[in-house]
């Protein structure tokens, strides 16, 4: 898919405008690195060191154990495990036999788990002990196809489950399994993972991500990274949940781009993240803005060894410009904002090192294309500087949702994925995300994007966090309401916040209402949860 695009001129030196994508698989890429560097650390987790050879040994044994249980190529196997080494090893085992990984959030309710088990048709699940009973309840309810429950007992968190033929102990399975490499031939178009996403409709859909998608990603990723560090020095700090596409792709798969080392942080707190940084000196950190902001508040950040991080990728939500400037000033690290989603193999655009634009999610990776179209008809292309819906096309885009042709047809048309994100491009064709179509506020006929207001609020020295929504207004249609969290020991009035906004925002963008909260509700990926804010507002209004 070779073509010239105006953003190519901003690529860092050496980054090609088109790439060659080998017809290989993630299974074969992992095995390649095992052969090249068997004794190199693959996973670091607290004091635990697991080499490539040892990880492969455990993965082979689990792969054979799954085959012995009747799991076949194309079967769906679910992982309900946090960021511990077993997740990575189990993922490699599943890929070895050509089964399809379904990674789910351990915090999901039984209803949420039931839906995704049912939709994916998963029959086998590997779960860590603290949430095993919840999964067993789902299996015993008989509403899914679950038939086999493999339980990883966590020392100190063991659980007592009923004794049954369909419940297996993870470690016992490994002890009795063969450690030979399964002789299962896979191809480039095989599905690796079903990544569930709410999408623009809120209905969870399984994104069918293939070996081809992931190979395309890590091919361009490593080319991009050469501007920041030597590929052989790749050490990935893993704080994003591995069950999320951002964590799975930017941590497990990106790490395979040059046979790097993963640094897992099972319990993500500012203290634990700084401890991992100081002990293991990561060079690359895919992070979320909320965690960056929390580290900014940590008194030990200036004394840490965070300057080892040469490429800090911020994604999943907008990073306030002030937070970016402060972190870089204190640590000397370089923060690069990017953009992606489950349907785009996560990363599809990012800022180059040479020409960064704070607030922008950057420019497209090689061999990908974009359009900004009007929100109503979705056919008219918008001029430079004018916002519209972002459409994307290229080798990183999924071909379909799992067994859902209707949603596939709604989201992917002529190869173009309709993201549901509102964006614009500037004169250099850098992309700026201003919101989601479902979060856009229409006030007195004007389109207002929450991020515009939140960015202003973040610049106030007394404000720690903020989130903005539209609320019903009989005259304007919607009025703007901002929820604000103050820094410890600070005070502000509603009038003072509104007046501050008037200094930087057009009149129609100025919030009409301010409510002070102790915390802004956020999703599991630390994005502002606008749905929760709207529900909070609904409850407030109904109670008055």
Image (cartoon, helix red, strand yellow):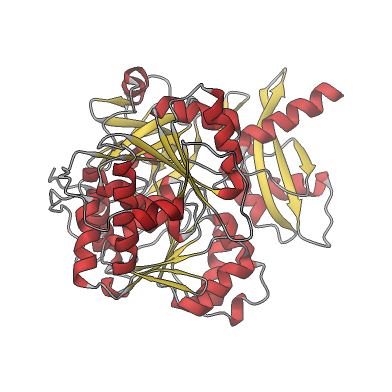
Judge whether 16 appears above or below 301 on screen: above
Q: Quadrant of residue 340?
A: top left
Residue closer to the observer: 107 or 213 = 107
Numbered circles on residues, count: 0
- The residue lying at 28 percent from left, 47 percent from top is 95
- In the image, residue 353 above or below residue 279: above
- In front: 169, or 213? 169
Q: Position of residue 355 (x, y in %)?
A: 35, 63
Q: Is residue 155 visible?
A: yes
Locate residue 500, reporting x and y percent.
73, 50
For residue 463, side relative to residue 317 (left or right): right
Q: Outermost residue, right direction?
A: 544
Would you place residue 38 above or below residue 250 in this image?
below
Name the quadrant of the N terminus: top left
Residue 128 at x, y = what percent?
53, 49
Q: Is residue 363 visible?
A: no
Q: Residue at x 52, y 30 (%)?
A: 139
Q: Position of residue 187 (x, y in %)?
A: 16, 42
State left or right for residue 306 relative to residue 470: left
Q: Residue 407 versus residue 384: which sits nearer the camera?
A: 407
Q: Which corner quadrant holds the C terminus?
A: top right
Q: Camera-side residue: 287 or 418?
A: 287
Q: Quadrant of residue 304?
A: bottom right
Locate residue 460 relative to residue 282 in the image: left or right: right
Residue ID at (46%, 46%): 244
Q: Is residue 441 left or right of residue 383?
A: right
């Amino acid at each position: 898919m070779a073509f010239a695009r105006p953003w190519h001129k901003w690529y860092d030196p050496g980054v090609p405008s088109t790439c060659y994508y080998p017809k290989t698989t993630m299974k074969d890429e992992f095995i390649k690195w095992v052969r090249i560097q068997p004794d190199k650390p693959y996973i670091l987790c607290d004091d635990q060191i697991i080499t490539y050879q040892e990880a492969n040994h455990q993965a082979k044994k689990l792969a054979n154990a799954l085959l012995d249980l009747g799991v076949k190529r194309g079967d769906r196997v679910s992982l309900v495990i946090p960021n511990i080494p077993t997740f990575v090893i189990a993922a490699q085992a599943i890929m070895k036999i050509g089964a399809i990984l379904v990674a789910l959030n351990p915090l999901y309710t039984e209803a949420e788990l039931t839906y995704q088990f049912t939709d994916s048709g998963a029959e086998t699940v590997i779960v860590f002990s603290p949430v095993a009973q919840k999964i067993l309840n789902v299996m015993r309810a008989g509403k899914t196809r679950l038939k086999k429950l493999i339980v990883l007992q966590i020392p100190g968190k063991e659980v007592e489950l009923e004794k049954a033929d369909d419940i297996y102990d993870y470690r016992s399975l490994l002890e009795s399994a063969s450690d030979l490499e399964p002789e299962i031939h896979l191809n480039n178009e095989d599905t690796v993972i079903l990544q569930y996403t709410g999408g623009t409709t809120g209905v969870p859909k399984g994104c069918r991500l293939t070996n081809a998608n992931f190979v395309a990603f890590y091919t361009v990723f490593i080319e991009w990274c050469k501007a920041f560090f030597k590929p052989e020095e790749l050490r990935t700090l893993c704080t994003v949940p591995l069950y999320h596409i951002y964590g799975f792709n930017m941590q497990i798969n990106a790490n395979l781009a040059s046979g790097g080392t993963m640094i897992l942080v099972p319990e993500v707190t500012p203290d634990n993240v700084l401890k991992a940084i100081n002990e293991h000196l990561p060079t690359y950190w895919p992070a979320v803005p909320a965690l960056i902001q929390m580290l900014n508040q940590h008194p030990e950040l200036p004394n840490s060894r965070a300057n080892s991080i040469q490429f800090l990728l911020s994604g999943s939500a907008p990073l306030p410009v002030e937070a970016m400037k402060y972190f870089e000033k204190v640590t000397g690290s370089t923060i690069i904002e990017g953009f992606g989603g489950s349907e785009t193999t996560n990363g599809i655009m990012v800022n180059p090192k040479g020409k960064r634009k704070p607030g922008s999610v950057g420019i497209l990776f090689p061999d990908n294309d974009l359009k900004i179209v009007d929100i109503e008809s979705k056919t008219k292309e918008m001029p430079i500087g004018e916002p519209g819906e972002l459409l994307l096309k290229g080798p990183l885009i999924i071909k379909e949702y799992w067994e859902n042709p209707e949603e596939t047809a709604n989201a992917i048309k002529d190869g173009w994925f309709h993201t549901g994100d509102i964006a614009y491009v500037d004169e250099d064709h850098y992309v700026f995300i201003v919101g989601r179509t479902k979060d856009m506020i229409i006030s007195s006929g004007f389109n207002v994007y929450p991020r515009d207001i939140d960015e202003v609020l973040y610049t106030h020295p007394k404000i720690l966090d903020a989130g903005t929504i539209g609320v019903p207004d009989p005259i304007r249609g919607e009025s703007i309401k901002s929820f604000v969290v103050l820094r410890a020991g600070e005070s502000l009035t509603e009038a003072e916040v509104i007046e501050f906004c008037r200094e930087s925002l057009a009149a129609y963008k100025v919030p009409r209402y301010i409510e002070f909260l102790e915390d802004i509700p956020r999703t599991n990926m630390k994005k502002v949860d606008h749905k929760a804010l709207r529900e909070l507002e609904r409850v407030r209004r109904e109670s008055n």
